[in-house]
Amino acid sequence: MSAEIPVFAFAAAPDQLREGMDMDEVLNLAPANLWMATSRNWWYQGLLSEVLEAYPGHQPLEYLLELLFWIPPQETLAKAAQIRALLSDIATHPEAFCVINYHDETPEGVRRQVSEAQTMRQLDDDCTLAWANFFSFLASQAAALEEAAQLGLGLIYAQPQPDHSPLLLSFTP
């Protein structure tokens, strides 16, 4: 049996937030058209942690490992560009990804999967397209940030867990 962890992202105005809000308060702000991905067994986060170690220089993306995080409006485009730069680095140097990959993958296969990454507002990791879904997860997070920037808003990034102690909104990783 697998655990399905939802990952939400949605645009929000700074005046809607205060540091210390709990997960439920933050999620009550979510619009109907939020961005959502399902991470089975928390593997996006485990793989992302390894990817950030294998591709130095992308520490600003460590917020993607947080359970609840706020990206202010003035940082949304920079974060989106950082995600796209990470995807580009993976495509340019797929060997590092192959070393951390959980199954045999070729550099050519990694390049192809990065190039085929889809932006999806609702991404369900069905485990059959696992690596392609991981790259689509990153591309979709970049799109969520870009959408927030177009609206002049910041972005809430939330990964609620069913058995968690109260999580409080953080403004710094």
Image: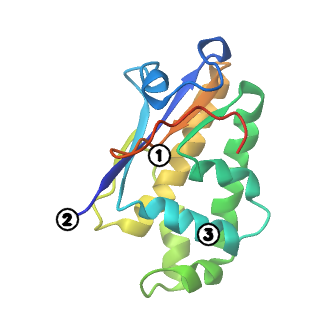
Mark 3: amino acid: Val
- Quadrant of the drawing holding the N terminus: bottom left
The residue at which mark 1 appears reads as: 119
At mark 1, the secondary structure is: loop
Residue 18 falls in image quadrant: top right
On the image, the x and y values in percent for residue 173 come to 70, 45
| Closer to the camera in the image, 84 or 71 | 71
Q: Which residue is mark 3?
A: 51
Q: Gap in Å between the C-alphas at discs 2 and 1?
A: 28 Å
- Disc on the earlier residue, 2 or 1: 2
Q: Earlier in the sequence, mark 2 or mark 3?
A: 2
Q: Is residue 17 left or right of residue 110?
A: right
Please give the residue where the numbered disc 2 appears in the rendered image: 1
Badge 1 density bin: few <14, some 14–19, many ≥20, Cα 10 Å: some
The relative height of residue 125 versus residue 106 in the rendered view (above or below) is above
Q: Residue at x 58, y 53 (%)?
A: 65
- State which mark lies toward you, 2 or 3: 2
Q: Which disc, if any, is residue 151?
A: none
The secondary element bearing badge 3 is classed as helix
Instruction: For mark 2, give the secondary structure.
Output: loop
> Which of disc 3 and disc 1 is earlier in sequence?
3
Residue 111 is drawn in which quadrant?
bottom right
- Residue at the image point whose x is 65% and y is 23% from the top: 150
- The residue most toward the left is 1
Q: Residue at x 76, y 41 (%)?
A: 78
Of tags 1 and 3, which is closer to the observer? 3
Q: Nearer the viewer, residue 19 or 12?
A: 19
